């Protein structure tokens, strides 16, 4: 299966960004929005203003000292092959690289921490609760259903192990996984946690310690009402 890398932190591309020989699209903070209906009977919380969704992301003042926005890089596209995970293959090429989360209304911010290679990425999506839930549920189920598989990105083989993590109750639904990527002798560990609250979907990815440190703060800001 040959696929194109999608611009999203979710899924395989989240950790491929940190590997030396793999290139993909990366972004700085981007702002888009949406309208939606409610699955749970709560107000939909649809974000109408084009800047409103981006204003719900964490910024440097929220994160504290030592965090810097990750510079936006020119778009680069590598073919990606997924080997040894039929569940991802069955979802199709875009899903294998996180592309099913390409909802039309989204905002994203990427940060590095200190002088280390630690990074944290936050994405917000706004769509109908059903679409948000179904889209991310399929990807998390597929990825955590394959404890080991391989990704070949730009000719570089990357060994991947995935582990489903327990989640405390936040929002309406929550998913979490730990991904370990090994390429050219370098290992990278990425934690991803996704929380759906009404018509908002929050995805926080990056170094496990940073995700744990900022997840609740990110959810509080994303779901705060003015």
Image (tube, rainbow, N blue to C red):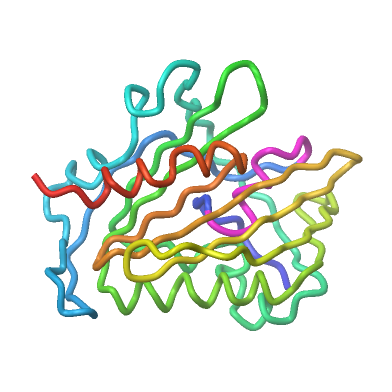
Q: Is residue 15 highlighted in magenta? A: yes
Start-end of magenta stretch: 10-21
At a point 66% along the width and 71% down the height, the residue shown is 144
State whether residue 42 is above or below residue 170: below
- The quarter of the picture where residue 69 lies is top left
Residue 8 lies left or right of residue 35; in this view the side is right
State whether residue 27 is above or below residue 127: above
Which image quarter is the N terminus in? bottom right
> Closer to the camera, 50 or 15?
15
Q: Is residue 31 highlighted in magenta? A: no
Residue 214: image x %, image y %? 44, 39
At a point 23% along the width and 80% down the height, the residue shown is 39
Residue 136 lies left or right of residue 177; in this view the side is left
Residue 66: image x %, image y %? 50, 17
> Closer to the camera, 1 or 172?
172
Residue 60: image x %, image y %? 37, 24
Which image quarter is the C terminus in? top left
Residue 19 lies left or right of residue 34; in this view the side is right
At a point 52% along the width and 43% down the height, the residue shown is 211
- The quarter of the picture where residue 198 lies is bottom left
At a point 53% along the width and 56% down the height, the residue shown is 10
Residue 62: image x %, image y %? 33, 28
> Closer to the camera, 52 or 40?
40
């Amino acid at each position: 299966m040959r696929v194109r890398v999608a611009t999203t932190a979710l899924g395989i591309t989240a950790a491929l960004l940190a590997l030396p020989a793999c290139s993909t699209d990366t972004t700085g903070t981007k702002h888009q929005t949406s309208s939606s209906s409610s699955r749970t009977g709560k107000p939909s919380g649809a974000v109408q203003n084009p800047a409103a969704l981006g204003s719900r992301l964490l910024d440097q003042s929220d994160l504290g000292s030592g965090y810097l926005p990750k510079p936006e890089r020119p778009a680069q596209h590598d073919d990606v092959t997924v080997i040894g995970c039929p569940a991802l293959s069955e979802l199709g090429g875009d899903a294998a690289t996180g592309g099913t989360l390409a909802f039309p209304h989204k905002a994203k911010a990427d940060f590095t921490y200190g002088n280390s290679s630690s990074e944290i990425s936050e994405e917000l999506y706004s769509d109908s609760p059903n679409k948000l839930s179904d889209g991310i549920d399929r990807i998390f189920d597929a990825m955590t259903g394959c404890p080991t598989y391989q990704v070949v990105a730009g000719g570089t083989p990357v060994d991947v192990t995935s582990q489903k993590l327990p989640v405390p109750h936040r929002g309406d639904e929550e998913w979490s996984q730990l991904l370990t990527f090994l390429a050219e002798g370098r290992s990278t560990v990425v934690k991803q946690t996704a929380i759906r609250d009404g018509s908002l979907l929050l995805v926080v990815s990056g170094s496990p310690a940073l995700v744990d440190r900022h997840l609740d703060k990110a959810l509080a800001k994303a779901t705060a009402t003015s």
